[in-house]
Image: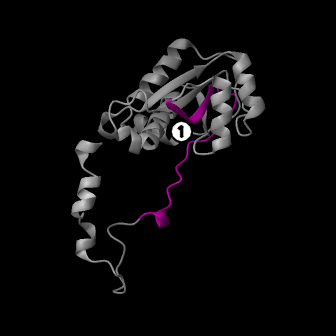
Amino acid sequence: MNDFLDVFFKRRSVRKFTKEPVSREDLITLLKAGMSGPSGMNAQPWEFVVITDEETLAKIRKNLMFAKMKGTAAICVLGSKRMQTNKAGDKFWEQDCAAATENILLAATAMGLGAVWIGIHPVHVFERQVKSILNLPTGVTPFNLIIIGHPAEEKEARTQYDEKRVHWGVFPRTGKEKWKEKDAELSDVEKREHDIHDL
């Protein structure tokens, strides 16, 4: 169990890579890890573009200001309206793609690879650049790019745990709050708007 938890603390953003390519087998393992992530109502609103050719990687480095790292592979995580299994994907695709991304990053760490998450969505200019470089079809939104490779740098394991950011139980009440018990209940209109069958 400790070995498993160590992966969380060892996961760091790696920005320096060797020239050794990442094998197709390893990339498929990363994708399997990503697709094992949780998604709201199992909508699975994602697709993945795997880039290993140097020409496309060079275009990414040239055009995207935060993607200058020279990894030998990249995975673009897409929010996919066309592939989602139900309408829950419309509401939760960002959370679902983030969960898939973290699984990929953790799997890369466990496999001795390095990786770094490059945010794309919701910055429209970044989305436009990636859509153009990857010739993306309609119905998908580039959520991020994960640059991957064999690491050429080592970083110490760490936790950024901060007790000041942790709240045990509800926030203390001062008596001045306007909140009432009924405020936590859904109205009839809200119940209709959030009917699980409409997702």
At a point 24% along the width and 46% down the height, the residue shown is 196
Q: Nearer the viewer, residue 53 or 14?
A: 53
Magenta stretch contains residue 124: no
Q: Amino acid at mark 1?
A: Lys
Q: Report which quarter residue 13 is drawn in.
A: top right
Q: Give the magenta part as a residue range.
A: 139-166
Q: Position of residue 170 (x, y in %)?
A: 33, 70
Q: Nearer the viewer, residue 106 or 69?
A: 69
Q: Nearer the viewer, residue 109 or 196?
A: 196
Taking 37 as reference, is 122 above or below it? below
Q: Position of residue 174 (x, y in %)?
A: 36, 84
What residue would you read off at disc 1? Answer: 10
Magenta stretch contains residue 157: yes
At a point 68% along the width and 26% down the height, the residue shown is 133
Q: What count of labels does the image hold? A: 1
Where does the C terminus fall, quadrant-wise? Answer: top left
Q: Report which quarter residue 67 is drawn in.
A: top right
Instruction: Characterize the local packing of mark 1: few (<14), some (14-19) or many (20 or more) Cα atoms within 10 angstroms.
Output: some
